[in-house]
Amino acid sequence: MSDPRDLAPADPAVISQLLDGRWRDVREQARELASDPRFAVGTSELGESVETQRERILERLHVLAAAGYSRLGFPTRYGGRNDVGGSVTGFEMLALGDLSLLVKSGVQWGLFGGAILHLGRDHHHERYLRDIIELRLLGCFAMTESGHGSDVANLRTTATFDPVTDEFVVRTPDTSARKEFIGNAARDGHAAVVFAQLITRGETQGVHAFVVPIRTDDGAPAPGVTIGDCGLKGGLNGVDNGRLSFDDVRIPRASLLNRYGDVAADGTYSTPIENKTARFFTMLGTLVQGRISVAAGAGSATKVALTIAVRYAEQRRQFEHPDGGEIVILDYLAHQRRLLPVLAKTYAVHFAQLELVAGLHETTPDLDEPIGERPVEHPDRRELESRAAGLKAIATWHATSTIQACREACGGAGYLAENRLPALKADTDVFTTFEGDNTVLLQLLAKELLTGYRDHVGELDLLGTARFVGEQVVETVVERAGGHRLLQRLRDAAPTAGEDGRVTDHDWQIEMFEFREKHLLDTLARRLRRAIDAEARSGRELPSEDPFAVLNAAQDHLLAAARAHIDSVLLAAFVHGIESLQPGPEHDLLVALCDLFALSTIEAERGWFQEHGRLTAARSKSVIAEVNALCELIRPHARTLVDAFAVPEASVTTAMLDTQAG
Amino acid sequence: MSDPRDLAPADPAVISQLLDGRWRDVREQARELASDPRFAVGTSELGESVETQRERILERLHVLAAAGYSRLGFPTRYGGRNDVGGSVTGFEMLALGDLSLLVKSGVQWGLFGGAILHLGRDHHHERYLRDIIELRLLGCFAMTESGHGSDVANLRTTATFDPVTDEFVVRTPDTSARKEFIGNAARDGHAAVVFAQLITRGETQGVHAFVVPIRTDDGAPAPGVTIGDCGLKGGLNGVDNGRLSFDDVRIPRASLLNRYGDVAADGTYSTPIENKTARFFTMLGTLVQGRISVAAGAGSATKVALTIAVRYAEQRRQFEHPDGGEIVILDYLAHQRRLLPVLAKTYAVHFAQLELVAGLHETTPDLDEPIGERPVEHPDRRELESRAAGLKAIATWHATSTIQACREACGGAGYLAENRLPALKADTDVFTTFEGDNTVLLQLLAKELLTGYRDHVGELDLLGTARFVGEQVVETVVERAGGHRLLQRLRDAAPTAGEDGRVTDHDWQIEMFEFREKHLLDTLARRLRRAIDAEARSGRELPSEDPFAVLNAAQDHLLAAARAHIDSVLLAAFVHGIESLQPGPEHDLLVALCDLFALSTIEAERGWFQEHGRLTAARSKSVIAEVNALCELIRPHARTLVDAFAVPEASVTTAMLDTQAG
């Protein structure tokens, strides 16, 4: 409250340009498309039946295809634009509108098309890509099974090679192996990329992907294919999720997407990556765009919700002001506390996402290059994948909690469908689950941070991680995780606005983030090592010799380490994002917002910081006070900060804002 | 992990009897009714149109009325049972099923019927209650306006007395005074209790309630009444929320519900409570049952979600166990952390709710006594009202976050409507808003704790509170808040299971809760006093002389104080609830669960406790370790603890549990 600083009015257009980043042209095109009445997110559609929603979304998908939206992420020779970063950016922009359309397009072009693009070879591209881009062939991505969602390596559908007919036989052994929650399956898909255990010559070669027709030309299920409907969902009801079972469905040998593993006519298996685990993760890694896209979509939905809630909070008045009139609700500290720290974090996530998309673009091979001439994997790819896993988890949880806060901040009006927040809530809810359960993803990130080498351990195989870490020199492992490097860059870049020793001192904030990340990783590695040592000495100090128990006891520590790492990534990206701004009101406003992100993060973790001797009681209290002061400082600029998201008006036009105007 | 304790198997029926409490017979009847197929929460209804949902809910409302459900809370002479506590308990049980039916019944009998019961006189009862109970008259509770939700005192609909015709003229001056989000208005209601500023002889006497016909016998809007439809909502779509505007609608003088204020034929106003503010709050206070009922409903929905999620977590397996087979997901520490502390808090909220309902029952006048012979207000009523406000806020936020956690804990399956969690999420979302916005309610509680006298200050008038507190002796004020008394009773009652000095020592836990509550209140009172003093000395130490700014700066402190108080209430109620159990496995299990509640609360507040010198770094870490140990200790009994809720099977039968069985 007693902060003497004040911020000059900033120009949202300047900030908007910064947020738009490298693919600004894609964003501008998307904003134009959003004003097309065919994409209006209007009240006339509210309450329509699931069938009507599905029909409408399919129609709009065709409009998107006709507008060329689907071309960005595919090779030029099939009508594509060979622009992976542009493709993810386009997806992000689409998420400012109807999220069923977003997910339907993601299934069709990102997952189905992407699997054929990245796991197939030229003859698959030749056969399918043009039809996929132009929507003559709709398809599914059939990975998840009823019994295996997170644990993909152990899914149970089989594809057994029969050399007599030169075919694979696809089989669902029982209900738990049924493909579950498969978009495009219940109604529209005619083919599916099916993930199954490849068996040839009596040997299982692990999970591979196969193109399987699931419907005949007249739309009936293909022979041997049973199709179920997942029915009504918590949201995204324009997407036809279904269930697929295969009763010895025969497909030609060429249906195997064989970039990373192939079967000869005689049944001989061959692969460019001998290690089975490494092969599996390389294959999955080519699909990382899906996770990055979900995080991008979550970010957009968060921006729409915040734009609506901040506008409402600036219009809505409640309770009398002593000086007369009624108090604008955004003037209440509690309301600022609800909306402004999450607004700051939304900026941080956005900047981190910009870097991630650029990283994806740089590490994805040139799509116009023939498959045979591409390297198996870009050297920076694995760091990108674990970063994507962590950011997906944090961005989608942030969306869930922020949209919830926005709904509550708009009171009863926020509960009416005409004001959009209920659909934003309902549609994004599953983002924390699909493309990888968030808890599982954070574990994946933590293990990558610990080991630096994934080849030595199975994904999510905690025991392997522990044993591996036990063999490492702990400090080296932590160095390798990149924490120091990242934060050193940040320290070099961050200008310190506050006076020395204040909690707004950037060096101090960075040290806090760095300490937390390093300490959590360091102690985690030591703890696992001790556990392994103790196990080796026959269980002394341990309640049991069950290695699962040992690892499981450290699960909360593992998750905390992953969160701390992503917090550092966010802070670094935020500071880095601001760097390119000229001095001026926009720069000053974003520095204050970055302070709010940093300090509200430290505030949330102040229990931990005090436990670890990094925050005195007095300083901890001053962090809280400074968060309040920053809320007050930034409050007059809240509208500028949401306007800078440049969400198309069609997406934020709601009844409560219309009637409340003035 | 290293805790040597172990718990013997407990009998869920024994715990269930404890949880059922005083109105066990009402609960048992409700469980029987729940098995009636007409109340099945089945998948066949999923995806139906809003109109179909509204129709179905109205049909079921008639079934409820025929079953006598509506009788509990009304006087015997109109066919009621004169059992207020039983009535709230019945509402709580109904919330285990379809929440639209719950809310529709709450509008009809709790709000519409309740307003006539508590604000009207015998002639109103005579005229309306039988028809309301037996559903011959459906009605609305028209309080909220588009422009005024929380700030009821300033709503703008007027009812002006015209002595010439002996009528009130009800008028909606503009759109912002339109009655908004009114249940039963869009489709079924024929009358409404309308809250309006009573004007007679040119003077405004404050908000009063009037019975206004809104539809004619053929269902058309009554002359001068405009009815709108709120349309699709985030949930509760079986309830027909609408908007009401009145264009000089004339109603007889007898339509004024005149228990607390009356107008004679000549326009003279009279009242048993001269102070306008006190009168307003006494009137509102008679309606406290609504808040208690919403909290009860939130508790039931939380129990349904937890029952589903715990059952799923005991069936679902994912990732291989080193000893073979796959790991049951509830064996993961992270999964226990997600579900067990919120399960413990659900018990705490339940026990607090039992006490609150008993308090409501005791402080509500005998409904069979003639109005004229009743006291204006029970002396314990105000403490009950502020307790109800706080508990409503905490119980409904707890429901929102717990149901969200349950959805995520069930992964993609949790997102399918057939598994019930999406509807539980969607339907309960608005509970944090209606019957009082939670943030506003916590402020109300905090101010009651500070002042002890509400007559001196307007509800939610922060400035009045501050000035008033400035005149008080701070320590006395804190004493009066009841913190000490409450916790002393608790200390006397709580057996200490852990060894001295351990974090499981109950005395220590209680001291921690007590210190937090007392310190927050104490410092808040001092802070407000200092602010007022400073203001009096012309603004020194303050950034401005704006008294709103002074109070607003303390808003987070105010909310923290209210939360701390409710935490103490929850702990006291939990301990008190266990007291009546005989020694045995059930007792031991609930003591462990109470420890988990206490320690996970302290863990969540450990930043604050360290800031205030009440927790060393080492002890703070040991709190975290003990929460983990308690999760491991309680995990084998999780199913017992949810089974003890005795949720009817019809409410938790879901597809994912069927197919996952075994």
Image: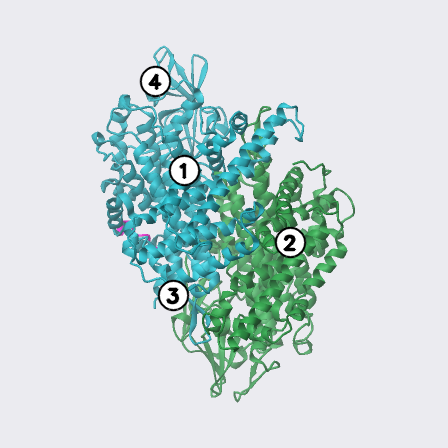
Chain colours: A green, B cyan
Q: Are marks 4 and 2 in contact (CB under 8 Å)?
A: no
User: To which quarter of the image does residue A3 belong?
Assistant: top right
Q: Is residue A501 above or below residue A290?
A: above
Left or right side of B258 for A556? right
Observer-nearest of A62 and A509: A509
Q: Earlier in the sequence, mark 4 or mark 3?
A: 4
Q: Label 4 belongs to which residue?
A: B253
Q: Position of residue A158 (x, y in %)?
A: 46, 77
Regarding residue A94, the answer to whether it shows in the image is: no
Q: Amino acid at mark 3?
A: Gln
Question: Where is residue A250 shown, x and y percent of the image?
Answer: 45, 79
| Residue type of the residue flagged with mark 2 | Arg
- The residue at 50%/26% (across/down) is B174
The residue under label 3 is B315
Residue type, numbered disc 4: Arg
Q: Residue tagged by mark 2?
A: A614
- Measured in 3D between alpha carbons, the distance from the residue under mark 3 to the one under mark 2, in whole angstroms, is 43 Å
Q: CA distance from mark 4 to mark 3?
A: 63 Å
Q: Nearer the viewer, mark 1 or mark 3?
A: 1
Write down the chain letter for disc 4: B
User: Which label number is shown at residue B485?
Assistant: 1
The span from disc 4 to disc 2 (Cα, nearest Å) is 69 Å
- The stretch of residues the image draws in magenta is B37-43
Residue A119 position in % (x across, y down) = 59, 73
- Chain letter of mark 2 equals A
In depth, the one of A314 and B626 nearer the eye is B626
Is disc 2 on the same chain as disc 4?
A: no
